[in-house]
Image (tube, rainbow, N blue to C red):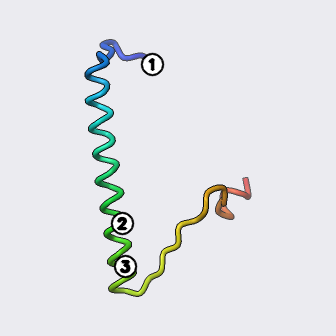
Amino acid sequence: MSDPHPLTPEQRIKQLEKELLDTQRKAEFFEAVIDVLEKEYGVKIVKKPRGISSAKSQKK
């Protein structure tokens, strides 16, 4: 499905900059949540190394 009014390069850049900002804010939020979980609740969260899949996805 194509867009009837394609964005100009300037509009696309603005759109991508907004998406980047939103993504950065989400990452900061999740990092803050993890910090609270670790410091206040003693929950240890370990990031999986790249290339390691969960058992669920390997069963397919």
Q: Nearer the viewer, mark 2 or mark 3?
A: 2
Which residue is most to the top? Answer: 4
Q: Nearer the viewer, residue 28 or 60?
A: 28
Tell me how far mark 3 sits from mark 1, CA to CA. 43 Å
* Residue drawn at the location 34% of the way across and 48% of the way down: 23
Q: Which residue is mark 2?
A: 31
SS at mark 1 in the image: loop
Q: Position of residue 13 (x, y in %)?
A: 30, 27
Residue 26 lies in quadrant: bottom left
* Residue drawn at the location 29% of the way across and 31% of the way down: 15
Q: Nearer the viewer, mark 1 or mark 2?
A: 2
Q: Position of residue 56 (x, y in %)?
A: 66, 61
Q: Which residue is mark 3?
A: 37
Residue 12 lies in quadrant: top left
* Residue drawn at the location 72% of the way across and 57% of the way down: 58
Q: Is residue 11 above or below residue 55?
A: above
> Residue type at mark 2?
Glu
SS at mark 3 in the image: helix
Q: Is residue 42 above or below residue 23?
A: below
Question: Quick check: 11 left or right of 1?
Answer: left
Q: Nearer the viewer, mark 3 or mark 1?
A: 3
Q: Is residue 29 above or below residue 46?
A: above
Question: Quick check: 38 left or right of 55?
Answer: left
Q: Which residue is mark 1?
A: 1
Q: Position of residue 60 (x, y in %)?
A: 73, 52
Tell me how far mark 2 sits from mark 3, CA to CA. 10 Å
Neighbours of disc 3 within 10 Å: few (<14), some (14-19), many (20+):
some
* Residue drawn at the location 28% of the way across and 54% of the way down: 25
Neighbours of disc 1 within 10 Å: few (<14), some (14-19), many (20+):
few
Question: Quick check: 21 left or right of 50?
Answer: left
SS at mark 2 in the image: helix
